[in-house]
Structure formats: C-alpha cells, structure tokens
C-alpha cells in the first residue's frame, strides 16, 4: 500500500483570523436541507476554509451495502474522471478508502503520484489531464466499527496542494460536514419517496440542449437563488421558475438542482450564463 502524508493538526496552529469563518460554516450548515444548498454552502462558507473546485461526497447506503458517491464540481471534469470519482468499486476510490482506514480515520492528504503505480492507465491519465496532484480526505466510520464507513469526503483542485491548516479545519468541521450532507440526502429522499432512484453522476443527459432562458435560470440556481428570488430578478412568477427548473432537470437527466448544475458545468452549458445578465423578455 502506498504511503500518504499524515499530519495531526494542532489547534493553536489555526489562523486566528479564520475563527469567524469557522463560526459561519457551523451556523449556516443548519440551514442546508437540499443538495443544491449543500453545493452552494460547500463552495461559499466551507470554501473559505477548504478552498476546492471538486468535492466528492459519499454516504453509506444500507440497501446496497456500500458507499454511494457523487461529485460537486465548479469546474468542468472530464467524464472518465467523473466516473472514477463516483464509482466506489474503481481502483482509485478503493485506494483512497483504504488509505484513510489505514491511518485510523484521521484527515490526510493523499499525493496522487504515490497512488499512480496502483492505478490503471486510464485512471492515471484522467487525473493527469486535469492536473490533480493531491486529495484531501476525511470521513466518518461507525462507532466501534472503524472498517465500516458512514461517509467519506474528498476535496481537490487542479494544480493545488493542501495546507496543514486545511487539514486541521477539515478535522474540526467533519461532524458538521457529515451531518449537513446526510441531512440533505435524507430530506430529498423523503421528498422523492421510497421508489426514487438516483442515477449515477456520469449519466448522460436524456434530452436536447437547454434554452437561453433555462441557461439563465440555471446560472442563478448555481448562485443559490430560490425560485422566489429568481422570479423577482427576471420579472416572472416563482411558479414559472419552478416549471423551467423541472424542464431543466428532465433535459439534463438530473434529480435535483445540484446535480443539474454539475452536469451543466461538465457539458459547458453554463458558459452562456455569463452573457445572460440581461433579462430575456420572452419565456
């Protein structure tokens, strides 16, 4: 098994100026109820302390008896790499899980170059192509059963290395990260009903491209705007916004707003949103 960088963070090493940011992360986490809210929270409040462009989150599914992963990314991720990062059975994910367990469940940084000898050519090329050098990893295991994971979180950005402080912040904030993500999953599961099934993150879109109006709305969804706020900005009713969002979900084959935003980013559809600041008068 490859060696990994393990640092036990010291609380007195934390940046004193980040104490307010820590409080904001914790206070705002209790307001997160949906995946799209989790995406916005992780990119904004949590991102101050743990800057990242890709977050891979996994939660144990008792029905399938394994971790189910999904990616929240603010940059375009090649489909092959997205598939690897969300497949619990891929060599890459198995090595990551194994490394975390071997280090007794502490926050750690896994250098990708130390994993390369254990990965397939496809996996190595997918990571190299995006410039991923390190993976910041932490998770939660069941009490008295360290080999049974309840959740696992991976943070990374291209051509970026993690700091000692970031490891310390992840160690400190893990209970809130775990509770926030599981709450979002639970809420959406209750809303969808027992028969709902989440398609894999790398699944292709089911229908054609989104319209300019839908692109504009999706850009505002990415910013965390509610239907009411989007309606006020665009001069349309919240119900009209809701109908547009439902059409977007169907076209992208997504089950929620966060997944729709992630897929639109991977398909580079939201590039059009930058030039869509002017209100489109026709729906």
Image (cartoon, helix red, strand yellow):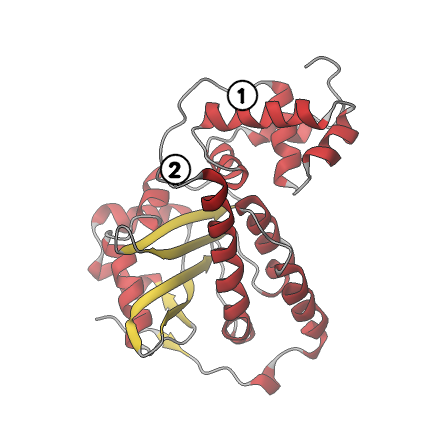
Q: Looking at the picture, does residue 94 appear above or below residue 54?
A: below
Residue 145 left/right relative to 57:
left
* SS of the residue under disc 1: loop
The quarter of the picture where the C terminus appears is top right
Do callouts 2 and 1 mark residues in contact (Cβ within 8 Å)?
A: no
Residue drawn at the location 36% of the way across and 76% of the way down? 143
Q: Looking at the picture, does residue 53 appear above or below residue 15?
A: above
In depth, the one of 97 and 253 nearer the eye is 253
Residue 59 left/right relative to 177:
left
Please provide percent x and percent y for residue 186: 47, 51
The quarter of the picture where the N terminus appears is bottom left
> Looking at the rendered structure, which numbered label has been put on residue 196?
2
Crowd tier of the residue under label 2, counting other residues whose Cα lies within 10 Å: few below 14, some 14–19, many 20 or above: few
* SS of the residue under disc 2: loop
Residue 264 left/right relative to 30:
left
In depth, the one of 236 and 52 nearer the eye is 236
In depth, the one of 121 and 24 nearer the eye is 24
């Amino acid at each position: 098994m490859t060696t990994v960088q393990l640092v036990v963070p010291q609380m007195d090493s934390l940046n004193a100026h980040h104490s307010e940011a820590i409080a904001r992360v914790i206070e705002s986490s209790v307001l997160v109820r949906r995946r799209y809210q989790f995406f916005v929270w992780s990119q904004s409040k949590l991102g101050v302390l743990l800057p990242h462009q890709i977050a891979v989150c996994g939660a144990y599914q008792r029905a399938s008896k394994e971790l189910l992963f999904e990616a929240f990314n603010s940059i375009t991720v090649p489909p092959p790499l997205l598939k690897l990062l969300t497949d619990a059975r891929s060599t890459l994910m198995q090595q990551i899980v194994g490394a975390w367990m071997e280090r007794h469940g502490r926050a750690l940084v896994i250098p990708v170059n130390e994993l390369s000898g254990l990965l397939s050519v496809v996996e190595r090329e997918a990571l190299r192509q995006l410039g991923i050098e390190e993976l910041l990893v932490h998770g939660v295991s069941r009490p008295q059963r360290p080999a049974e994971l309840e959740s696992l979180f991976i943070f990374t950005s291209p051509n970026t290395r993690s700091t000692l402080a970031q490891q310390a912040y992840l160690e400190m904030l893990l209970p809130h990260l775990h509770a926030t993500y599981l709450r979002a999953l639970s809420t959406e599961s209750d809303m969808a009903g027992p028969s709902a099934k989440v398609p894999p993150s790398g699944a292709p879109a089911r229908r054609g491209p989104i319209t300019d109006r839908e692109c504009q709305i999706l850009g505002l969804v990415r910013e965390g705007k509610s239907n009411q706020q989007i309606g006020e900005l665009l001069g349309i009713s919240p119900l009209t916004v809701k109908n547009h969002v439902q059409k977007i979900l169907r076209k992208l084959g997504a089950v929620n707003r966060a997944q729709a935003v992630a897929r639109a980013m991977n398909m580079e559809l939201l590039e059009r949103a930058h030039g869509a600041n002017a209100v489109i008068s026709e729906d």
